[in-house]
């Protein structure tokens, strides 16, 4: 399964008011492993960046004035995400901006769902942790992901951090010890270890016919004695 963890930075918060994308950052996962492939691009939004937005991500108007416009980078970006599942925190925000950019091109390229599926980690986190804060920073604290370099928002850095959070949230293990409970009720002391991207595939050892037969006999004995063997349901 190929997934692309994605984040964007923008000139403001509402595309209907003319705000545009100024940065895209993507990290590729394949079968829940980092492949080492990324996509990162700064973009000239062809408009001013709001001061409030600059205070969040630190990207200035002067910095992006010599960067390519979205139409120039769209083919390469769409090729990178094509056929993957996008993993995004608060997906409606980023997908809304991406679809807005595609619509402005008037080139018939369609919308993001024509290229990729979308998984919203914010919606997932709200189901797993109802009533708690589920911002990316809050999830980093809850799952023990190091975000100490995140003084300002940055699309590629945030995508890398979100990738770690997503892997822990969907398959990692966090401590269940009451001693690890924080004052706000969140659990810490989790960690994730990135394995080398070139490591060999794990060897799969299948059960022998004799082992399968013995296993089935054991399940049958459980069914006879209790009348309710869950492994036979």
Image (spheres, rainbow, N blue to C red):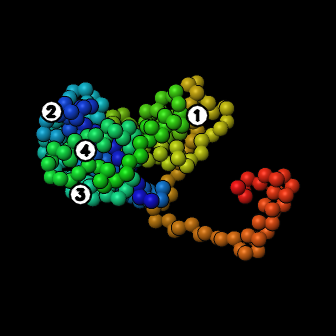
Tags 2 and 3 touching, CB below 8 Å: no
**Which comes before the other along the chain, label 1 or label 3?**
3
**Which comes before the other along the chain, label 4 or label 3?**
3
Give the structural element (helix, strand or loop) at label 2: loop
Can you give x and y, in whole percent of width and height, for residue 160 in the image? 40, 47
Mark 4 or 3, closer to the camera: 4
Q: Residue furthest top?
A: 183
The crowd level at tag 1 (other Cα within 10 Å; few <14, some 14-19, many 20+) is many
Q: Is residue 128 visible?
A: yes
Q: CA distance from mark 4 to mark 1?
A: 37 Å
Locate residue 205 relative to residue 132 in the image: left or right.
Answer: right
Locate residue 213 relative to residue 195 in the image: left or right.
Answer: right
Q: CA distance from mark 4 to mark 2?
A: 20 Å
**Which comes before the other along the chain, label 2 or label 1?**
2
Give the structural element (helix, strand or loop) at label 1: loop
Residue labelled with disc 3: 76
> Where 70 falls versus 93 (above or below)?
below
């Amino acid at each position: 399964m190929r997934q692309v963890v994605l984040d964007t930075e923008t000139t403001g918060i509402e595309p209907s008011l003319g705000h545009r994308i100024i940065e895209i950052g993507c990290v590729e996962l394949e079968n829940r492993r980092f492949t080492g492939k990324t996509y990162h691009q700064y973009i000239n939004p062809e408009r001013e960046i709001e001061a409030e937005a600059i205070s969040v991500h630190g990207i200035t108007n002067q910095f992006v004035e010599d960067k390519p416009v979205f139409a120039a980078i769209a083919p390469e970006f769409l090729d990178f995400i094509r056929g993957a599942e996008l993993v995004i925190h608060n997906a409606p925000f980023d997908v809304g901006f991406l679809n807005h950019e595609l619509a402005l091109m008037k080139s018939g390229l369609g919308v993001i769902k024509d290229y990729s599926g979308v998984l919203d980690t914010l919606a997932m986190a709200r189901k797993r942790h109802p009533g708690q804060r589920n911002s990316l920073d809050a999830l980093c604290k809850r799952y023990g992901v190091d975000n100490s370099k995140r003084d300002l928002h940055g699309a590629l850095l945030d995508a890398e951090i979100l990738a770690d959070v997503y892997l822990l949230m969907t398959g990692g293990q966090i401590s269940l010890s009451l001693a690890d409970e924080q004052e706000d009720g969140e659990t810490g002391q989790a960690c994730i270890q990135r394995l080398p991207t070139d490591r060999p595939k794990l060897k799969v050892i299948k059960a022998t016919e004799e082992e399968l037969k013995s296993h089935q006999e054991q399940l049958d004995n459980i069914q006879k004695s209790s009348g309710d063997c869950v492994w036979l349901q």
